Image (spheres, rainbow, N blue to C red):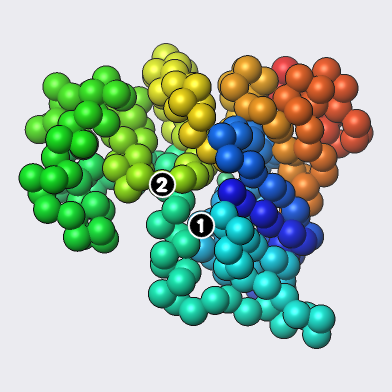
Amino acid sequence: MISAQDICKAFNGQPVLRKVSLDLMRGEVVAVIGPSGSGKSTLLRCLNHLETIDSGQLLIEGEVLAETNAAGVCSYVPEAQIRRIGRKMGMVFQSFNLFPHLTVLENVIEAPMVVKGLARAQIVPRAEALLAKVGLLEKRNSYPARLSGGQKQRVAIARALAMEPDILLFDEPTSALDPELTGEVLRTMRELAQEKMTMLVVTHEMGFAREVANRVAFMDRGELIESGPAAEFFAQPKHARTQAFLHNML
Ligand code: ADP
Ligand code: MG
């Protein structure tokens, strides 16, 4: 579903991603862990084209998004193609990013109406089904300000699903939540995993990574240090930096 090869990205000459390679298979859940500032968000933002890469190769569902030639020049496919490929992915942010002036239901139907041009009558039943799925149908007419953080994040997940993405990217979806609200969001994500949604999840929730992720990848200082099947990764981390990180987290 995603194939990233040797992705490099620098900000103001400072490398933030150093030859990062990562694959995501259909139906797979991959957790990306690592210290703050290691480049996890930048990696997700590059995959979702919220940032451009400086070099490397990026394929989404087998389609080239960006590639780098032998001379080291990185080029992207035309804008229309980028947008089409981009729609295969949905993203859920740490800070929810709901539209404050729209109700819960309106938040969920906005993108399908504006981006996909679907009629309101067409998308509302589906949006309501998604809100029911995340346990928030009764909040459909509430504004985000009236919701708890956990409820906001579940609306954000429903909103991402309303675009029918093939891949969901999560950037620390529970980091802004009080501990007692983390569980309800993780439960929703766990259900999506059981339904074989393809997900790439940046998280500090080691329990979630261990139980739900098929594979775990560890990033440190812009490098993807190691990745492996979750059970193996936690039981026998190979790299000293991974061991040190896990030692502090667990
Ligand atoms: P993480 O998500 O692992 O905490 P980030 O990808 O957010 O890490 O950041 C990695 C590094 O890139 C940090 O040093 C951060 O300050 C820097 N960085 C991220 N985004 C930008 C940006 N838009 N401009 C300049 N520096 C950035
Ligand atoms: Mg981050």
Question: What's the residue at 72%, 82% (across, down)?
Answer: 73
Q: Residues within 10 Å of mark 2 (few under 14, many from 20)?
A: some
Identify the image quadrant of residue 25.
top right
Question: What's the residue at 72%, 75% (across, down)?
Answer: 68
In this rendering, the answer to whether 241 lies above or below 20 is above
Q: Which residue is mark 1?
A: 48
Asked whether residue 14 appears in the rendered view, the answer is no
First reached walking from the N terminus: tag 2 or tag 1: 1
Query: What is the x, y in percent for residue 105?
Result: 16, 38
Q: Is residue 21 left or right of residue 114?
A: right
In the image, farthest residue toward the bottom: 71
Query: What is the x, y in percent for residue 176?
Result: 44, 33
Callout 2: helix, strand or loop?
loop
In this rendering, the answer to whether 233 lies above or below 88 is above
In this rendering, the answer to whether 221 lies above or below 65 is above
Q: Which residue is mark 2?
A: 165
Q: Is residue 14 left or right of residue 80?
A: right
Residue type at tag 1: Asn
Callout 1: helix, strand or loop?
loop
| Callout 1: CB less than 8 Å from ligand 1 | no
Question: What's the residue at 24%, 52% (across, down)?
Answer: 112
